[in-house]
């Protein structure tokens, strides 16, 4: 049953509402903030950002903009001041750096008196995952439970934009080269931003504690992506499977740092375990509409590049 979070939080803390969004200069945090403005008065929104100047446009629209750095707890005390809810957007770091940052943010939100802490977790969160960010997400969820504050861990599906990244030079070479993989429930950034806003403004039983996986409508492996790109662009793309070691060596030969290469190899190992599947209907049900498909994302991103390549006006497809 959907209930009014707006009434729920006012009932608990009086007439003052303040939703804090971290990482509002990033893609997901900015999308959440923009959508919040459509549902919540600007004076009830605050953003916590490392670069205040980059968020000046939000301040000009009435949003409270304060510097907040997960590596500086005192800055978070100021950025989270008066918070009724805090949305912690996960960092792009991994390992102890990520976990320390997330724990600091959780502690700061609790100290600020937030009535609920929301966190952008992942459907594949697991302590034993071979994909680096997933144990970090699992440990952050444990920190949320230990905080004693009501929380929502948004178990987001894998970003569909990552599928575009994994295509690499396939439009140039006609080959999608990667290790053996498994199906992934690719999910659009915009849908996940909408879901976060709904979690902040409407609540619902699916959004208490750790949510079900919030995913696009189908799980697709790289062979399926190759087939999709072939259909959408007219450029035949062949899926080529290589060993983990060969793939890692190729990445290093192209100048990728070892840590990044290991991260990507771990991604494929986790997908083979089924960590990013199956697709789940919760996101579409929450949105009240079909979730964006991977084909939709590829149509908007890859197909125009391929068309430019055919016309001779585009640069390398992998650029």
Image (tube, helix red, strand yellow):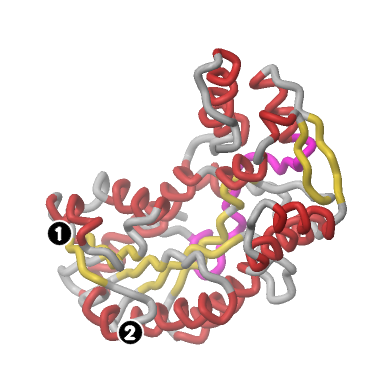
The residue labelled by disc 1 is 43
Which marked residue is nearer to the observer: mark 1 or mark 2? 2
The residue labelled by disc 2 is 73
Q: Is residue 203 above or below residue 159?
A: below
Nearest to the observer: residue 237 or residue 157: 237
Secondary structure beneath disc 2? helix
Mark linked to residue 264: none
Q: Residue furthest top?
A: 311
Nearest to the observer: residue 273 or residue 203: 273
Q: Are marks 1 and 2 in contact (CB under 8 Å)?
A: no
Residue 278, given in percent of the width and then of the height, sits at: 73, 50
Q: Which residues are magenta?
A: 205-224
Residue 134, given in percent of the width and then of the height, sits at: 64, 68
Q: Is residue 91 left or right of residue 70?
A: right
Q: Quadrant of residue 7?
A: bottom left
Q: Is residue 30 above or below residue 290?
A: below
Q: Is residue 298 left or right of residue 69?
A: right
């Amino acid at each position: 049953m959907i209930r009014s979070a707006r009434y729920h939080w006012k009932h608990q803390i009086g007439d003052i509402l303040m939703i804090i969004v971290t990482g509002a200069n990033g893609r997901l945090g900015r999308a959440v903030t923009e959508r919040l403005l459509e549902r919540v008065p600007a004076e009830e929104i605050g953003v916590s950002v490392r670069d205040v100047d980059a968020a000046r446009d939000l301040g000009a629209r009435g949003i409270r903009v304060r510097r907040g750095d997960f590596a500086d707890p005192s800055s978070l005390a100021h950025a989270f001041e008066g918070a009724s809810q805090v949305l912690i957007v996960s960092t792009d770091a991994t390992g102890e750096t990520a976990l320390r940052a997330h724990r600091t943010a959780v502690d700061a939100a609790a100290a600020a008196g937030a009535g609920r802490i929301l966190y952008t977790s992942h459907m594949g969160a697991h302590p034993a995952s071979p994909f680096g960010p997933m144990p970090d997400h699992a440990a952050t969820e444990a920190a949320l439970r230990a905080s004693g504050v009501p929380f929502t861990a948004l178990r987001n599906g894998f970003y569909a934009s990552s599928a575009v990244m994994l295509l690499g030079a396939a439009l140039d070479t006609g080959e999608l080269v990667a290790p053996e993989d498994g199906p992934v429930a690719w999910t659009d950034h915009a849908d996940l931003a909408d879901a976060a806003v709904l979690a902040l403004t409407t609540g619902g039983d699916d959004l208490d504690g750790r949510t079900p996986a919030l995913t696009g409508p189908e799980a697709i492996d790289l062979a399926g992506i190759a087939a999709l790109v072939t259909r959408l662009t007219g450029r035949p793309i062949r899926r080529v499977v290589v060993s983990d070691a060969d793939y890692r060596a190729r990445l290093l030969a192209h100048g990728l740092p070892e840590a990044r290469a290991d991260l990507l190899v771990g991604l494929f190992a986790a997908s083979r375990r089924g960590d990013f599947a199956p697709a789940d209907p919760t996101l579409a049900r929450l949105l009240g509409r079909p979730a964006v498909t991977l084909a939709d994302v590829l149509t908007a991103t890859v197909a125009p590049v391929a068309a430019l390549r055919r016309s001779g006006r585009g640069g390398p497809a992998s650029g």
